[in-house]
């Protein structure tokens, strides 16, 4: 008899799980609330012909997804056209100066030296140190952590002097770079986790390393195009995807989930994979009495990431002199972070990320037009900020910040506009507190201290996505799908070894192979 799996959510983790489980011979059904695949990694399409990524715009470390495609009999690079960016992004410092981040070692050393002569040679030292750190730690991001016992393995204990869990990311970068602006250039990536570099564990220096070592990619059509491709392949493999059909409740037999209910039907299954936002799903769909470890009270006590204020702008004309990715780092970065994380208020000089993807990808806008994607990290949903009153004024702050980046005269050129606030992330996209990067990644919320991929509070339930191990970011979300799928198949007594899986080493490089560069 064919076993059946329900997957709640067609985000990147849910789609990757569906592909892997279908390849293993299971009947797979995805219930997706939205009308398109991808969740936060989906595409906004407008009648005017503009296309935007809803969420992630950087595609990093494709090796994980490449392995998944290989295991199901597909070739990622044949299915998805990707451009490796050079420069990767432009950094503009409110404190003065700019830096064009490039994966070319000699050019990057020159960029660092130009901004801070005292840091000459530091980039190479940083890369050498983090190359070893990543190679040795990457395998642990591809296996489950279900108790503290999983931490006390000889191999992991030997890594402690390299991982330095007692140090912050900023402190770790201080051992390489003396100039605070250069340190920011290699620590702002902690924002991918929704964290401050002054709290983020030093382990995550591997994030900036990955960008330089393995590349920052733009998939043609945006990151949402990757999700659409995965959904197409899953459908080709026999996966049922029910769009516009949110799960309204779950059926239980004791602590085991036996079925999911929507407004259209009740779907029984042998196992359930939850790809929807962990905290929001648990507090809405699972009775508090059934969750011993992750009760409503426990979830509320956890640290959650920041949120984001978003503007998606369809523009008349082009800004060809502006790089694909630009990041503005506030003049007083520490104060900006304090406003977000502890004061829960809106500052007047916020850091901001801008994507001008039209210089790389002509598919995103009509001829002679372009798209701009603006993201400002802000506090998660909090009583201090009433977005019904603040949103319009903060839009003006965001547009004013564009002047600092050389993007002038924007207001009269806007032909399409969409805004998202933390309220919208929570109420429109079902994200707990609007915390777009899920649970924070401090030491008390990593590895076995995150919700487990084989969910510990319910039977037959498996978690994928940013709210579980290994954490946020597309590469590790795909890795969560691999981990959860392995556990699910093992529990159902299905041998998944015929997948032809390549061993996880952390040293395989995709990005030095034939990929278009820009």
Image (cartoon, rainbow, N blue to C red):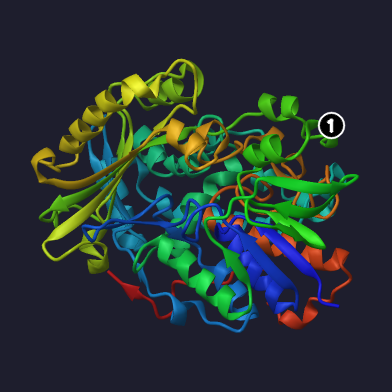
Coordinates of residue 455 in the picture (x, y in percent): 79, 48
Q: Is residue 417 above or below residue 105?
A: above
As displayed, is residue 165 above or below residue 143?
above
The residue under label 1 is 289
Quarter of the N terminus within the rendering: bottom right
Q: Is residue 143 visible?
A: no
**Image side of residue 236 versus residue 94, left or right:** right
Residue depicted at 39% across the width and 33% down the height: 421
In this rendering, position of residue 262 left or right of residue 178? right
Q: Residue at position x 32%, y 63% from top?
A: 85
Q: Position of residue 70 (x, y in %)?
A: 60, 80
Specify whether residue 510 is in view.
yes
Residue at left offset 68%, top offset 57%: 265
Q: Is residue 422 left or right of residue 276?
A: left
Rendered residue at 57%/59% (across/down): 10
Q: In the figure, 468 relative to 1: above or below? A: above
**Front-lying residue, 72 or 273:** 273
- Quadrant occupied by the C terminus: bottom left
Local secondary structure at mark 1: helix
Q: Position of residue 475 (x, y in %)?
A: 56, 59
Q: Please tell me how crowded label 1 is: few (under 14), some (14-19), or many (20+) other residues with Cα within 10 Å.
A: few
Rendered location of residue 497, percent (x, y): 79, 79
Q: Is residue 172 above or below residue 500?
A: above
Asked where in the image residue 331 lies, by quadrant, the reply is top left
């Amino acid at each position: 008899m064919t076993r059946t799996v329900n997957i709640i959510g067609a985000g990147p983790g849910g789609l990757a799980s569906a592909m892997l489980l279908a390849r293993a011979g299971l009947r797979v059904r995805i219930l997706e609330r939205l009308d398109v695949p991808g969740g936060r990694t989906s595409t906004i399409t407008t009648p005017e012909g503009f296309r935007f990524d809803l969420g992630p715009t950087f595609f990093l470390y494709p090796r994980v997804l490449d392995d998944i495609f290989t295991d199901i009999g597909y070739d990622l690079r044949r299915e998805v056209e990707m451009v490796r960016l050079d420069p990767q992004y432009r950094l503009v410092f409110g404190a003065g100066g700019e830096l064009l981040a490039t994966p070319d070692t000699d050019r990057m050393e020159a960029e660092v030296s130009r901004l801070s002569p005292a840091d000459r040679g530091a980039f190479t030292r940083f890369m050498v140190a983090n190359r070893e750190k990543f190679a040795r730690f990457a395998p642990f991001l591809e296996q489950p952590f279900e108790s503290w016992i999983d931490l006390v393995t000889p191999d992991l204990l030997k890594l402690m002097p390299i991982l330095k869990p007692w140090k912050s990311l900023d402190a770790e970068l201080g051992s390489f770079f003396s100039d605070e602006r250069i340190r920011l250039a290699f620590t702002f990536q902690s924002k991918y986790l929704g964290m401050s570099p002054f709290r983020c564990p030093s382990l995550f220096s591997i994030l900036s390393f990955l960008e330089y070592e393995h590349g920052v990619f733009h998939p043609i059509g945006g990151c949402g195009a990757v999700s659409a491709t995965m959904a197409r392949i899953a459908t080709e493999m026999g996966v049922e995807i029910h769009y516009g059909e949110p799960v309204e409740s779950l059926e239980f037999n004791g602590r085991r989930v036996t079925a999911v209910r929507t407004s259209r039907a009740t779907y029984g299954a042998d196992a359930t994979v939850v790809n929807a936002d962990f905290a929001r799903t648990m507090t809405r769909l699972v009775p508090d009495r059934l969750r011993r470890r992750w009760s409503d009270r426990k979830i509320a006590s956890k640290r959650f990431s920041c949120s984001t204020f978003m503007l998606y702008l369809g523009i008349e004309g082009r800004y060809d002199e502006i790089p694909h990715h630009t990041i503005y780092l506030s003049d007083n970065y520490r104060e900006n972070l304090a406003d977000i994380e502890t004061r829960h208020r809106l500052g007047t000089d916020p850091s901001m990320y801008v994507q001008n993807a039209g210089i790389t990808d002509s598919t995103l806008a009509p001829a002679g037009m372009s798209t701009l994607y603006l993201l400002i990290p802000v506090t998660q949903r909090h009583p201090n900020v009433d977005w019904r009153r603040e949103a319009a004024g903060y839009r003006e702050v965001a547009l004013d910040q564009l002047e600092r980046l050389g993007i002038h005269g924007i207001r009269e050129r806007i032909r399409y506009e969409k805004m998202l606030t933390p309220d919208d992330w929570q109420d429109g996209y079902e994200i707990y507190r609007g915390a777009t990067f899920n649970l924070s990644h401090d030491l008390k919320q990593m590895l076995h201290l995150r919700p487990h991929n084989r969910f510990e509070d319910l039977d037959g339930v498996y978690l994928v996505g940013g709210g579980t191990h290994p954490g946020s970011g597309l590469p590790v979300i795909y890795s969560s799908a691999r981990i959860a799928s392995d556990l699910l198949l093992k529990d159902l007594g299905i041998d998944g070894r015929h997948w032809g899986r390549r061993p996880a080493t952390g040293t395989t490089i995709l990005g030095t192979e034939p990929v278009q560069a820009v």
